[in-house]
Image (spheres, rainbow, N blue to C red):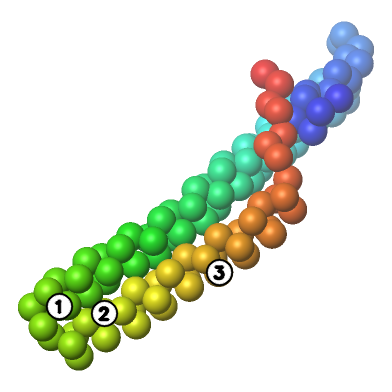
Amino acid sequence: MTECEYPAYPVILGDPVSHIATTVYRVNWLRTKALCDCWNEEVILVKHEMQWSVNFFTYKAKQWLSLMDNATSTGLTGHACYAARQCHIYQQLAAHAAESFQKVIPVIQPEVPVVT
């Protein structure tokens, strides 16, 4: 039985206690399934947010590289140095984020299959 599979409980017809117990089991199972679904969605979102962070740092590095090229072509040495430093910082951030996330991703549990 998977974590999100509804267990079958015996129901004795005509027994009100059994009916109440079955209803309680169903409500608890539905609440647990909703919680399981929420956490599965959260894992998916966190994985995407990790990639978005790396993409953002890479984009900013490319943006500063372009600004550095523009400053170099116009002869603004100070501007070019500043842009080069910013480009290097964002490249390091992207590399560090990618490396850190690669260490964490195998730890994140895969999605739990939902049986309907």
Q: Which residue is mark 2?
A: 83
Q: Nearer the viewer, mark 3 or mark 1?
A: 1
Mark 1 — residue?
Answer: 71
Secondary structure found at label 2:
helix
Q: Residue at x 26, y 79 (%)?
A: 83
Q: Do we see residue 18 in this rendering?
A: yes
Inspect the image, locate mark 3, and give the three-letter code of the amino acid beneath it.
His
Q: Report the residue that reaches farthest toward the top.
A: 13
* In the image, residue 75 above or below residue 109: below
Q: Which residue is mark 3?
A: 96
**Mark 1 residue type:** Ala
Give x and y (percent) for residue 39.
63, 46
* Labels 2 & 1 near each other (Cβ < 8 A): yes
Question: Measuring 52% from the left and 66% from the top, which residue is drawn there?
Answer: 95
**Which residue is rendered at x = 12% and y = 74% of the image?**
73
Q: Are marks 3 and 1 in contact (CB under 8 Å)?
A: no
- The tag earlier along the polypeptide, 2 or 1, is 1
Depth check, mark 2 against mark 3: the one in front is 2
SS of the residue at dot 3?
helix
Dot 1 crowding, Cα within 10 Å, few <14, some 14–19, many 20+: some
**Kind of residue indicated by mark 2:** Ala
Residue 115 place in picture, x, y as percent? 71, 21
Task: Estimate the x, y position of residue 4 in percent, counting from the top left.
Answer: 74, 30
Measure the C-alpha gap from mark 2 to mark 1.
8 Å
Quadrant showing the N terminus: top right
Q: Residue at x 87, y 9 (%)?
A: 13
Please identify the residue farthest to the left as the structure is shown: 74
Tell me: residue 96, above or below residue 102.
below
Residue 27, can we see it? no
Marks 2 and 3 sit apart, C-alpha to C-alpha, by 20 Å
Considering every residue shown, the one lying at the far bottom of the view is 78
Q: Position of residue 89 (x, y in %)?
A: 41, 78
